[in-house]
Image (tube, rainbow, N blue to C red):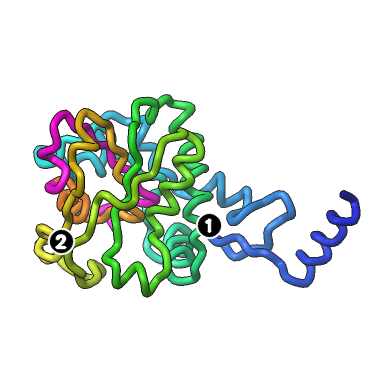
Amino acid sequence: MKAMTIINDLMSLIYPRHCEACAENLFRHEHFICNYCKLSLPKSNYHQKREHELSLIFAGRVPFKNYLSFYVFEKSGKVQRMLHAIKYQNQKELAEFLGELYAEDLVKENILSDIDIIMPIPLHPKKLKARGFNQSEWFAKGIAKLILKPVNGFSLERKKETATQTNKKKYQRWENVDGIFNLKQPELFANKHVLLVDDVITTGATIEATWQALKDVEGIKVSVISIAFASRKI
């Protein structure tokens, strides 16, 4: 055990691990993000509020039970840096780690106690092949570790490939995702509470498009959760 500790310390000196939020070196006991960032990153705390900016973008259109997001996205900030690492630097395990962190907070508040199924929003097969993984699915895996519910990454399918939502105006985002999802075997979700998982929510267009594929399932309840929410104030 002592020999392994020495080896790990030497490896840390030769190949230092960096915080994915601030780029500072990590101590041996830290994983992915340093303790300072873990405490100081801009959490939304939406699970502690009855109404908030995320819930209001769906008001009157999408009747979800819970509207949850771990962080508030800040342009050029630490949250953006982490999301970039996940999507473009193959740091899928970071997404899983963030799912575990957020689930710890939610379990303490008994927020997800009645969830039956965790469902990540799918990528189009072409994009999935190019990237090699679905970041929302890895975030979902982290949540699942804490609440012990199954992740269903196959029943919701993306029927057509869409252009990136980045730099699109609100109405263009809605047009871009209209009718793109299909739910296979909808009977499996009857009278179930589904936790719909995304990486970043902006206008909510993708989430509402997903709801269109789920809404006719008998007795279904849906909550939505994401790593970050890009506030309209940004």
Amino acid residing under circle 2: Val
Dot 2: element: helix
For the record, the magenta segment spans 212-234
Q: Nearer the viewer, residue 70 or 209?
A: 209
Counting residues from the start of the chain, the first of labels 2 and 1 encountered is 1
Between residue 4 and residue 201, name the one nearer to us.
Answer: 4
Which residue is at the front of the view, 115 or 51? 115
- Picture quadrant where residue 166 is located: bottom left
Q: Position of residue 115 (x, y in %)?
A: 34, 31
Q: Report which residue position mark 1 lands on.
A: 93
Is 199 situated above or below 124?
A: above
Q: Is residue 121 left or right of residue 134?
A: left
- Please name the residue that numbered disc 2 is placed on: 177
- Residue 62 — which label? none
Disc 1 crowd rating (10 Å Cα; few below 14, some 14-19, many 20+) is some
Q: Is label 1 in a helix, a strand or a loop? A: helix
- From the viewer's perspective, tell me whether residue 91 is left or right of residue 187: right
In the image, residue 230 lies in the stretch drawn in magenta: yes
